[in-house]
Image: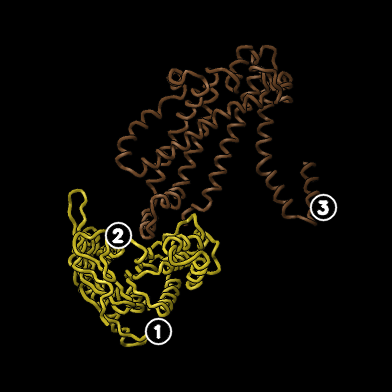
Chain colours: A brown, B yellow
Amino acid sequence: MSSMQRSNTMAKAVSFRWAPDFAAIQQVLVQRVLPPVVIIALLGILWELLCSSPGAVLPPPSQVLRDTWELIVNPFYNHGGNDVGMAWQILASLERVAYGYSLAVVAGIALGVLVGQSTWAMRGLDPVFQVLRTVPPLAWLPISLAGFQDSTPSAIFVIFITAIWPIIINTSVGIRNIPEDYRNVARVLRLNGMEYFTRIMLPAAAPYIFSGLRIGVGLSWLAIVAAEMLIGGVGIGFFIWDAWNASMISDIILALVYVGIVGFVLDRMVAFIGSWVTRGTAQG
Amino acid sequence: MSNRYLSIENVDMTFHAKGVESQVLKGIDLTVDRGEYISIIGHSGCGKSTLLNIVAGLTESTSGAVILDGKEVNSPGPDRSVVFQNHSLLPWLTVYENVALAVNKTCARTKNKAERHEWIIKNLEMVGMGHALDKRPAEISGGMKQRVGIARALAMEPKVLLLDEPFGALDALTRAHLQEEVMRIQDELGNTVIMITHDVDEAVLLSDRIVMLTNGPSARIGEILDIELPRPRDRIALADDPRYNHYRQEVLRFLYEKQRKVESLAQRRGAVGEKEKGEKQKDEKEKAKERARAKA
């Protein structure tokens, strides 16, 4: 209460120069930042209470912090082999996701355009897509290991095959929903195929495409952790598996927090790019 | 000066859907002079828009031909630019970019970059949208969007300008205002225009000739009315003009007596249940007059 009052008086004190900015920042802090901070603090306290009893199997947050402090403060150490800092582990995973996801974006949009444009292609390919997209990501790993004979391309392939389905399906729906009016405009102007693709089709379908991209990036990140547990090497997924084998539960918990934060950031990044690119696409 | 700039020759249109044939247009014959302003009026569903789409080349007629300036029309093109009823601006482009897309595509050979820029600005200023070049369609009103749509169509320097119920989605005041603008631009540029409308006053005010379509299926040209009112026309002065009222009544008589809209069975059953059929007819006429009065 007293701190609230103090910040209010501070707002008044500063308001001589840039009052509106300060008020806006304060509003954001109170409305957006405060509620999650309060909830996280409450959950932390609850966790601490539940895991503090002598018989608890999982460590309380204070214990986790103590155990993993070295990892948290030294994210970039490198002792060779798999013994590298958390930042390197996450970057290694992100690199795999970047390759697999980029391939999925290119191939997914291309296939989505094909399926969206051609009724024949849709009739032929849609049943195939509908069946294949239900195959769980990890089920692809053995077959891709057999095919590629190497773990890195296999992991990338698993990411690719996981992320591509929502991209294809959303792109094709977006293409099929392009209003007839826009097509007519293109026909009256006699836009050629390439002009139609870049000036009408992509912008008109962009909101759909980006919702596919957003689902895809989330699925990629889900799949990479599981795939890395099996293929080993540097990467956040194998780090978790390794920690489990060494019974370092605190390390696992720290890794889970990092995985969650990175996944959240990836989702927000794609969402932000999407809203920036499609800022003008709202129906007018 | 009948020089047959555009001629629509014996056009039939039949749609096939699920094995059912439905003839929409039958034997449409029409010639339009250069610089003439033609309105096509008829009840909704009679095939007006289909006819316009055939002239635009967006729909292919079942038989017959459209000949513009000595060449047969068989695909859409910028020489027949269309102002669509719902403006059809691309929402991801600004007002300027929407017109620029058309200008850069159609005038790439005839104008250099600076000339194209000037031409875009000139057309947007002509419709009074010079102040909103960087606005996106979502940020401007319906009337403004339609202005931009008109600027886009004019900027292509079409041989025929096709207006598909251009003011249908606008409120009465905005519509009146835009009609004035279109008349002014028409006086200035002398375009050849075909406009689809279902608004009797709009047709009489703007047109040199009004083409009235009979009710579908198999709609034909019922009557053609020459509007010999001097230009520039002023709607307020015309309101008391006997010739204007005579023209308006001619069109109203065609639409509400000769071609009274046959309502769907369900609607008719509901209405006839309460009244005698003759009474209902009278009622319809009354309503039509009321509508006409409300618009005047």
What crowding class fits label 2: few (fewer than 14 Cα within 10 Å), some (14-19), or many (20 or more)? some
Disc number placed over residue A13 in the picture, else none: 3
Foreground tag (3 vs 1): 1
Q: Chain of mark 1?
A: B
Identify the residue at horizontal 23%, vertical 75% (top origin): B254
Counting other residues with Cα less than 10 Å from the Cα at mark 3, is it few (<14), some (14-19), or many (20 or more)? few
Q: Judge by depth and name the residue closer to the eye, B116 or A54.
A: B116
Q: Which mark is residue B232?
A: 1
Label 3 and label 1 in one chain: no
Give the quadrant of residue B87: bottom left
- Above or below, B133 against A203 in this view is below
Tell me if residue B276 can be seen. no
Q: Is residue A11 above or below residue B279?
A: above
Residue A143 location (% of width, % of height): 42, 19
Q: Name the residue that disc number 2 marks.
A: B75
**Separation of marks 2 and 3 at Cα, in angstroms:** 70 Å
Q: Residue flagged by tag 3: what amino acid is it?
A: Ala
